[in-house]
Amino acid sequence: MLIKADVLIINEHQISHRFAIFRGNNVEQSYRIFGSEMSPYSVKVRSYFRYKKIAHEWIIRTTANQEEFSRYARLPLVPLVVTPSEDVLQDSTPIIETLEKIYPDSSIHPAEPTLAFLSALIEEYGDEWGNKIMFHFRWWHEDDQRAAARVLAHSRVISDNESEVASEAKNIRERMIGRRYFTGSSAANADLIKTYRDDLISILEKHLVDRSYLFGQRPAFADFGLAPELYELATDPTGGGVIKTKAPLTLAWCQRMLEPKNDGDFEEWTTLAPTLNPLLKNIGQFFLPWTDANATALLKQQDNFKVSLDGKFYEQQPQKYHAKSLQKLRLRFGAIEDRAALDKILLEAGCLRWL
């Protein structure tokens, strides 16, 4: 049964409200997702719920429900999932991994261990590196800053008082600009980030010619990690202009991932390899050296680190979460019993040395 409730829909930074929340026959059995349309991780989790057809309520986090959110939140971050038994889940990747054990049908993990790991690797890349691209372009140019801050302010402050919304937008903009350096968004890195973005969408345009999702005709873990970052990029003035003009297949994939469906099987590596290998090489060239350098900098208790990526330096403060995430990826890799085929693929892509 479909019951309607308030949901924020964003199209090129125009806000409208409509009703579209999925519930089961028993309201008490519904999950609740506190999230934001402007959060790629919230969109990621919501897409998973929709794909699995799990009864849920999508709740935009606002000042009006802040008290309720705070009762559940261990961290002041979205997405936050409250289960029917009132357990709380936070952090998009563990949320999905937890639910995948409960709802294994139409699995997002290919049965073949090699493909399953490659999908997990791309999911990690999307979460940690794709987010850098999205965050940089959302908060670098003034037009993007103002547009994003205003959308966020309207979603947070439920008020017709324009001065309240303007004040909230100003606070959001200042706060997010202040966070740029922590993500590596800086004048020194700006040209490199643009290169990463352009390379990525060029690779995806070729790969998505003959398939609906990254690993075939059904979404994999990889799709849930990478598509929301580019979806968010596409809603901003600068990023949206680039994707709409240069990457129509990528844009269609991002939109498809808002309501993903199981339309067939995962492909074999032999058919994926010609156009997925370039993405793996991109990961081995840029993302994995960076995340390894980040982890090393933390071990050395450095306040800042610089890493050469394809002959150009990238600099930022080390981040603990990225290091923990890399450790989990390495544990996943080490748990695979027969890695002969996987090692060959990763070696050729320049990824193996970092794992």
Image: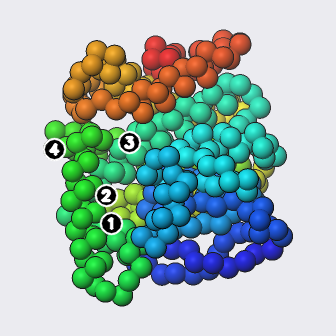
Whether residue 132 can be seen here: yes
Secondary structure, mark 4, is loop
- Tell me the kind of residue under disc 4: Ala
What kind of element bears circle 1?
helix
Categorize mark 1 by other alpha carbons within 10 Å: few (<14), some (14-19), many (20+).
Answer: many
**CA separation, marks 2 and 3?**
18 Å
Q: Secondary structure at mark 2?
A: helix
Using the rendered view, name the quadrant where residue 27 is placed.
bottom right
Q: Nearest the camera: 121 or 165?
A: 165
Q: Which residue is mark 1?
A: 148
Q: Which mark is residue 214?
A: none
* Residue carrying label 4: 187
In the picture of the structure, the residue carrying the numbered disc 2 is 138
Please report the residue visible at 67 percent of the width from the left and 79 percent of the height from the top: 4
Q: Amino acid at mark 2?
A: Arg
Which residue matches tag 3? 199
Q: For marks 2 and 1, give the CA distance.
A: 7 Å
Give x and y (percent) for residue 212.
65, 53
